Image (cartoon, grey):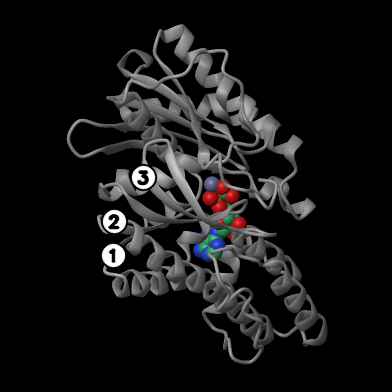
Amino acid sequence: MNVLGIETSCDETAVAVVADGGPPIIRANLVQSQSAEHAPYGGVVPEIAARSHLDHLQRLIGQALDAAGFGFDDLDGIAAASGPGLIGGLIVGTMAAKGIAWAAKKPFVAVNHLEAHALTARLTDEVAFPYLLLLVSGGHSQLLVCESIGTYRQLGTTLDDAAGEAFDKSAKLLGLAQPGGPAIEAAARSGDPRRFPLPRPMVGRGGCDFSFSGLKTAIRERVAAAPRDAQTVADLAAAVELAICNALVDRTARAAHRFRERHPDGTALVAAGGVAANARLRRRLAAIADDAGLRFVAPAPALCTDNGAMIAWAGIERLRLGLSDPLDVPVRPRWPLDPDAYTAKKPR
Ligand code: KG4
Ligand code: ZN
């Protein structure tokens, strides 16, 4: 099965072709970041994002098909991220996918962007259900039990900001580039996290929820009181990275314990979403998984951040079960993975 995947839910225009039948193969995986276009505004501007997707998507689809050596006729389905995300971008990607599906008479799959992050470990490492997932991106911080395609149970979520947002806002306060996660990770390499001790939100509390807004306030205060030399910025970046990792790791350890009790057949702890590209976090999560007797799986960093391969793969997973969508299915700017779970925060 060969599937074209289109991702336009935020500020990356991404297109991939994934082939299945034996171990899955990523035949093409192109990502065009818009960060330079949003940089003057200090954050993603939805209108600019939608127009930029429109400018680049058609070319990227052509390039991805060329790289894979495929025409539309070689495809078995077209998948697009249809939510959650910014409505303008979702419409651009979803309408392009529907147009190709209609013209080429192929099935269309409306993919949940979060489900695509959740299933990436099955593309890269063939992880079996059930597994525990830490999904940490710019808009989401969730702990979920992934039971089967379409069945996800939320154990915890953020009460305010997402982990990626905490990285991005901290980077802004420190005068570092966006996206903030990679910028903080790079600056932190030469920093001492002990110079500016930060609070450890929710650590030791019951449940598996996250909270990052208190941390943001603490960082703002430290930044305002500190000098602005390069070493100080590095030390603050290291403190931020450590504090966010500590919060994520504490909650994930609790969730791993719960997961083990409820799912003795559980196979793995999986990390996904852009923040899961962070090397310090990956090391710490690997240790937790080890303690809990779980396999730790985190896709390569380029498959943790937004990409088209994860959308194509989610399309393959659904098509294999005979699931596709009609061409009049709407985009869904809000689309929780666990519809029964409370959402403390509006998704980005
Ligand atoms: O999954 P993603 O690419 O897009 C969303 O669906 O939101 O995640 C983007 C987020 C951003 O907040 C970015 O700062 C963060 O992931 N991120 C990182 C790293 N790479 C990306 N955070 C920490 N360390 C990284 N290396
Ligand atoms: Zn994402």
Q: Do the residues labelled 1 and 2 touch (CB within 8 Å)?
A: yes
Asked if residue 58 lies left or right of residue 149, the reply is: right
Q: In this view, does 158 lie above or below 323?
A: below
For label 2, the residue is: 266
Q: Residue at x 61, y 81 (%)?
A: 239
Q: In this view, does 75 lie above or below 193?
A: above
Alpha carbon separation for disc pair 1 and 2: 8 Å
Q: What amino acid does circle 1 point to?
A: Leu
Q: Does residue 348 appear in this view?
A: no
Residue 249 is situated, as x and y percent measured from the top left of the image, at 48, 72
For label 1, the residue is: 294
Q: What element carries label 1?
A: loop
Q: Which residue is drawn at 61% across and 73% down?
A: 202
Q: Which of marks 1 and 2 is in front?
A: 2
Q: Which residue is drawn at 75% across and 43% down?
A: 45
The residue nearer to you, when weighing 82 against 128, is: 128
**Nearest to N terminus: mark 3 or mark 1:** 3
Q: Which of marks 3 and 1 is in front?
A: 3
Q: Which residue is drawn at 37% across and 56% down?
A: 300
Asked if residue 158 lies left or right of residue 227, the reply is: left
